[in-house]
Amino acid sequence: MTKLSLIVSPERSAELKKEAVQLPSWDLNFHQLWDLELLMNGAFRPLTGFLGKADYEGVCKNMRLESGDLWPIPITLDVSEELAGTVSSGDRVALRHPEGMVLGILTVSDVWQPDRQAEAEAVFGTTSDEHPGVFDLMQCNPFNVGGSIEGVELPPHHTYQRLRHTPDELREEFERRGWERVVAFQTRNPMHRAHVELARRASTEHDAALLIHPVVGRTSPGDIDYFSRVRCYQAVLEHTPPHSTMLSLLPLAMRMGGPREALWHSLIRKNFGCTHFIVGRDHAGPRRKNGESFYGPYDAQELLAQHADEIGIEIVPFKMVSYVEERGEYLTEEEIPEGAKVLNVSGTELRRRLREGSDIPGWFSYPEVIEALRRRHPPRSRQGYTVFFTGLSGSGKSTIAQILIAKLMEIDERPVTLLDGDIVRTNLSSELGFSREHRDLNIQRIGFVASEITKNRGAAVCAPIAPYTQTRRKVRELIEGLGGFVEVWVSTPIEVCEERDRKGLYAKARAGIIKGFTGIDDPYEAPENAEVVIDTGELTAEQSAHQIINYLEHEGFITTD
């Protein structure tokens, strides 16, 4: 069996570690870390490193490497201008884990500055930052460095170690079990009875064993954390044939690229030794704010059909199954008798029932799965949450926040923490200036502290100006997976803010004494989808705080009885 791994021998590894001391280093972020792991363990074959410019352009344009091999997603290493300016073709760079250890050595082939807008249009078919792949792409460093990799060691994993397999390990395990045909089921969500039924049907129809192969790297914002999901998968295993079902975790950074992503997932599963791959409706397709998908329901299946001859793995179209009450079983659309009563619990309905602590029917899921989800998603009255104010200086944010804090302490048992803009500047960000970069960093720090409070089921009230949409979105995504997030836009007009300006900051900004002042010579990007909008030119601070209390009560975070 041909080995796919790029990890070198122990002797060569020792040499590379010594060499790395003298080399320029790049500290990988988690997205890059997941990419590097799958490059080094062979999951991204035929790639042997991060794409150079020619391969990158070929992948973006027509999903082809220079060699002609099919490859739909650019696997690139984005770096700072500082590093890009110090390396060139032939140089070597030590790639380091965030904890400091050297994972691999990159031999540079080329360095270039890509057009991120053009890449987004080519790969995702859109430049809208509502698409999570586009949003992530626009946050990348400005330069790409391509080149081959010598793998020193795979990144360490401290969780579920026995459920993690390299392609070489999984292929060897299939051989040991005598599995010649294996159908892979990809998921980034918990599995319920319907998922188990469709996976079982695919396995039976193709006379294949079943690999449950969930993604535990970067998925879509708002997805359930992988710890909770793995507990669900482990519970599901108790309801599947042990001799023909296996669970393995995939540390993939998804791009949510729809059809291209589905093709990519297929090639990855081929490298893991699978012979069949289940592809569903709107595979890896994100949704817009209005709920519409970026891709058509069958775009992924159609793209895969076009390349069926060279993928090297058979595609199994996802068959929707529904629970038929009279029959007490799940059936496909073709099997459902005319007039039969079909039951269903949508994802939105499931989240509502979890949020409210309502009953979840046994026909929908397994008791162990429901229990795992309830532990992770208690009723909102027991979740942590963040109230995140944004608005111009003088709009009334701090005053409303102070009143809100007092009211919450009176009616709610959760510990409440105020993260006011001025307070944070003094105690957490005193070394920062007011450039856009420093303002973003300040908001990200506030978001991090708020996320820790929320994760531990407290209440955080944040009251910065937070003028930039992308930074607010980062904070939302950081917190929403941990608890509630309520954005409050204090939309008080700038004329009213200036009239209230006791410190004379607006006057100094208009006179040019203060530079980069939000609303004067630096933009304020108004929120488009804030949960609560308040104009303190029309409402008192007391009324404004009461409006937020009403929202929190309506959404179930607090009770005022």
Image (cartoon, rainbow, N blue to C red):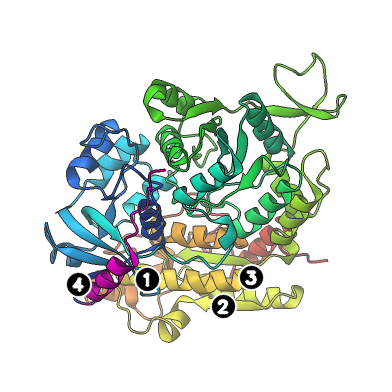
Read off the residue under disc 3. 542
Read off the residue under disc 2. 418
Distance CA(mark 2)–CA(mark 3): 17 Å
Read off the residue under disc 4. 23
Q: Foreground mark, 2 or 4?
A: 4
CA neighbours of label 1 inside 10 A, class few (<14), some (14 to 19), many (20+):
some
Amino acid, disc 1: Leu
Distance CA(mark 4)–CA(mark 1): 29 Å
Q: Is residue 352 above or below residue 94?
A: above
Label 3: state its secondary structure: helix
Q: Is residue 186 left or right of residue 239?
A: left
Please report the bounds of the magenta region as a residue range: 1-21
In primary-sequence order, the first of circles 3 and 1 is 1
Q: Camera-side residue: 294 or 277?
A: 277
Amino acid, disc 2: Leu
Amino acid, disc 3: Glu
